[in-house]
Amino acid sequence: LGVEQFSFTGGEPFVNRDIFPILAYALSHRPCLVLTNATNPLRARLDKLTDLADAQNPLRFRVSLDHPDPGRHDAIRGEGNFQKALDTMAALHDMGFGLSVARLAQPDEDIDAINAAYIPYFEEAGLPSGIPFVVFPDFLPPEAHPGGIPEITEHCMTTYHTVESRARFMCNFSKMVVKKDGRLGVYACTLVDDDESYNLAPTLTEAMQRRVMLRHHRCYSCFAYGASCSET
């Protein structure tokens, strides 16, 4: 199928007791990306990453740092977790792993200015200043049903997007595999698993052949703001 990368998300992937053999197996086939809070579940098991640093394919980590103000981050993630995440990132960097940061965007913010506000914290932790960011709008909690958000039609996509920009929509080239109650489901993307209609098929081959309808409110965020969980 031409799969290029495996990504692991949660919750927090490192609460899974089998995450290290899972990653070792996946890395024997393709590069991997892990989305993590980089706090206690990972910090307590950093020594187990040593063998993965020399895996056949590279392993990267995307760390959630919601705001460059530690207090605002900790109000969401828990007291002290901004510094814990930075310390963990420094350890991962020292082990040779690639890093990126995921954060939330505020309405009408200056994205470049907010990204730059992280740099003093990176430098203090011994991290490179050029760590890439993945910036998300407010997707609202799972199972939220906000009113007044339009369904994205084929006319919307062809009028307001080019062939190239449509190709960058994550649901065009990626899928999320979820195991629930012992059964696998392949969802359109990582953000719509609160809607069972986006469980496209039990296999990746079948799911890639299904047309994805952009009626979820998070689809509108992707359409309007260019949001994507991808780093490509």
Image (cartoon, helix red, strand yellow):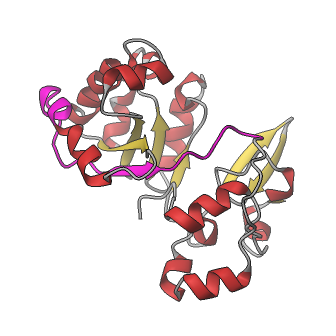
- Residue at 74% from the left image edge and 77% from the top image edge: 153
Q: Is residue 159 above or below residue 136?
A: below
User: Percent x, y for residue 189?
Assistant: 66, 57
- Residue at 57% from the left image edge and 22% from the top image edge: 15
In the rendered structure, the answer to whether residue 15 lies left or right of residue 50 reads right
- Residue at 36% from the left image edge and 19% from the top image edge: 71
User: Percent x, y for residue 24?
Assistant: 48, 40
Q: Say whether residue 202 is visible.
A: no
Q: Is residue 78 above or below residue 52?
A: above
Please tell me whether residue 130 belongs to the stretch shown in magenta: yes
Image quadrant containing the N terminus = bottom right
User: Percent x, y for residue 14?
Assistant: 52, 26
Quadrant for residue 214, please give it.
bottom right
Residues in magenta? 120-143
Image quadrant containing the C terminus = bottom left
**Observer-nearest of 194 and 61:** 194
**Observer-nearest of 218 and 150:** 150
